[in-house]
Amino acid sequence: MKSATGPIEMDTLTLTVKLGYGLGGFASSMVFGLVSVHLIFYYTDVCGISPAWAGAIFLVARIWDAMTDPMMGLLADHTRSKWGRYRPYILIGALPLAISTISLFSVASVGQSGRIAYAFVTYMLFTSLFTIVFVPYSALTSAVTKNTMQRAGLSAYRVVLEALGGIAATSGAMPLIHMFSDESVGYAAMSTILAIPAMLCWWLCVALIREAPRQLPAQSFPSLRIWRKLSDNTPFLLLAGAVVCGLIASNFTVSTLNYYFKYVIEREDLIGTAFLCLSAPVFIAVPVWIQVAARVGKRNTFLAGMLGVNAALLCIFLCPPAHPTFVLCLLAVLGFFGASGGFNVWSMLGDTVDYGEWKTGLRTEGLIHGYIGLFMKLGMGLAKLIIGFGLSVAGYSADEDQSATALFGICVLFSLAPFTINLVAIILLMWYPLDYQFCNRIHDDLARTDQVPDNADLD
């Protein structure tokens, strides 16, 4: 039976598959959260690296990602093994990625130039290994099932477990760090304690899920034709633009939260609570957004969430810093509305994969998710670059009383800048064309040329 907007029944995937897929999201979110939230603060306030140099390190890594992420997607798309196209890379890459995560927070006590060089090398290694694991993992969304509503259910498990990983990386990290009198030792210990469970969760993800069998046409390895066909996928281009804007905006907020509470609010003890307020509402929000998406569609749900996020950001900018409780409440509101994007984006990406196959005859899950992996890291890198130079221009000085200009700069980076960037994402989403009726039409057309039944023995 179908509603006016789409099918009601969607959960034919087993609980084991959904939990296994979600565990991969838990691991990815925990590692990505450690880096996106804590690394720039670790570089500037613990290692003594200038904000400008820290921003430059992130920028160079993003240029490298511009080459490696799409190529990783293409490589995975053309891989054939008994483990499928994507899972072998998660299996192989999990251990070295965990080791590289620990190395990021273990900068040696050498001179300034030596610390900068070490930070550059270890971060480049980390971002390369994260590409090897995360791009194939993201492609599993459309490889496990072709049904748009089942992808929504699968993405819900991912978002909930990603929230748990985010809480571990944000609220859970600070108590671990403060267990040690030497802050540098605390960061190294914290990264070790969190990286090992992440590795185990990636391995469990590989063990618990299966890629749906498909009859795929033989494809030659990358040609200009693939790149041209990808440019014809208008829904993907619009969604990708919205994603990169949203990620830049969110990275502004999470990356400057430490600075905001330490220097503007002057309540460094509330940093862990603030991250918890951002992450915990997802457990309430995801069931709500699932119901909303079933009635008004994924795009409209995403838009509603972005509008709610922007309302919260504007209120934070206008809120006097003398009222930390009100700021914490606004962060909870931001987290609730922000969950709509995290819930919808992965399911919507699967729909753009189907659209690309329907329009061009080429199915490129890995390439599309490779680009999304690139855009995620571009968002993080550009945000870090702007934050680093913004702090320098505003006159920020680590572990000292900040000038009025520096405090205002932190407030702008924390709330007003992401508010402005989110407006661009909202405009792009308004043009996104794929609704449930369009996706069902695409699925029916593709089913006529694909004789392999969907979700055949996935557990």
Image: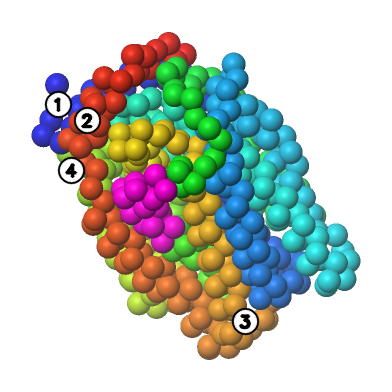
Q: Which residues are magenta?
A: 228-246
Which numbered disc flags the more N-terminal residue, 2 or 3? 3
Q: CA distance from mark 4 to mark 1?
A: 13 Å
**Amino acid beneath label 2:** Asn
Q: Report which quarter residue 313 is drawn in.
A: bottom left
Q: Which residue is tagged 1? A: 2
Local secondary structure at mark 2: helix
* Mark 4 closeness class: few <14, some 14–19, many ≥20 residues within 10 Å: some
- Name the residue beneath numbered marker 2: 440
Rounded to the nearest whole Å, what is the CA distance between mark 3 and mark 1? Answer: 55 Å
- Please state which amino acid type lies under the numbered disc 3: Ser
Residue furthest right as drawn: 110
Q: Quadrant of the N terminus?
A: top left
Residue 214 placement: quadrant: top left
Nearer-N-terminus badge (3/4): 4
The residue indicated by pointer 4 is 296
Does residue 240 appear to the left or right of 83 in the view shown? Answer: left
Please give the residue where the numbered disc 3 appears in the rendered image.
392
Q: Amino acid at mark 4?
A: Val
